[in-house]
Image (spheres, grey):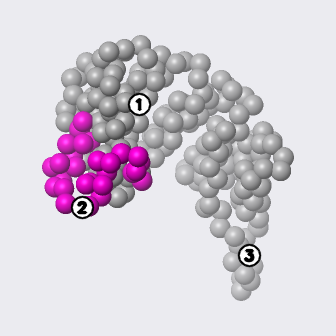
Amino acid sequence: YVLAGNLSLRLAESSFPELKAPNTRFPELKALNSGNLSDAVKTAYLQKSIDYARKAVEVNRFSSENWANLGRTYQLFIGSVPARNASPSDAGGPDAQKGALDAYNQQLFLDPASPQPRLVVGKLLADLGAYDQAFSLFSQAVNLKPDWNSPHYQLALLYRQVGRPQQQAEELQRALALTPQNTPERKQLSQELDNLLAPASPAGGPPATPSGSTTRIDK
């Protein structure tokens, strides 16, 4: 079911330009990329990917990865095509946003010692404006893996979103201290921190470097 769901997911992805790039290993993508399919057919691929992911959960409800796959499937289509209502006793709901959060919550319940899912869900919550919940999950990730730089960086981004530059700088410094020397990530983090701490340019002088750039840390 997971493999079938992934195939349907890639087919659906290829139908919506705003989503991920398609995986060209599948010949079915040629037809979709031709642009001749109706929105109804495209939506059907989306629903198939959700249905297969849900079926995998039904087969093994104790697999955190199955719930994570269902959450990712729903999350990918937030704001795109409404997903069909699901049973209230399962991971679904009236839309992709609720489906993603419900599935991810099950994953967190089944995998309480892993920091990575907490970053995934925290970033989704931050994007949805649920800053307190995102802060809680990022903090949990810090406690679960204190030597990992990524939770600190996500906290820095969160503090930037809510307009707290001092806390943002502190978390950038913590992330920087945990990042290996002579790596692109460290260079980017150092630049972001310098930009944040740089004084404003005097009137008539050259503009200060903006601090809005972001670094992707996946380690």
Q: Secondary structure at mark 3?
A: loop
Earlier-in-chain disc, 1 versus 2: 2
Q: Amino acid at mark 2?
A: Gly
Q: Which residues fall within the magenta stretch? A: 21-48
Residue 105 seen in render:
no
Earlier-in-chain disc, 1 versus 3: 1
Could you tell me which residue is drawn at 26 percent across and 42 percent down?
46
Tell me where residue 197 appears, x and y as whole percent.
76, 59
Q: Quadrant of the N terminus?
A: top left
Earlier-in-chain disc, 2 versus 3: 2
Mark 1 → mark 2, Cα distance in angstroms: 28 Å
Up-down relation of residue 91 to residue 166 (above or below) = above
Camera-nearest label, 1 or 2: 2
Q: Which residue is mark 3?
A: 201
Q: Which residue is mark 2?
A: 35
Q: Which residue is mark 1?
A: 69
Q: Residues within 10 Å of mark 1 (few under 14, many from 20)?
A: many
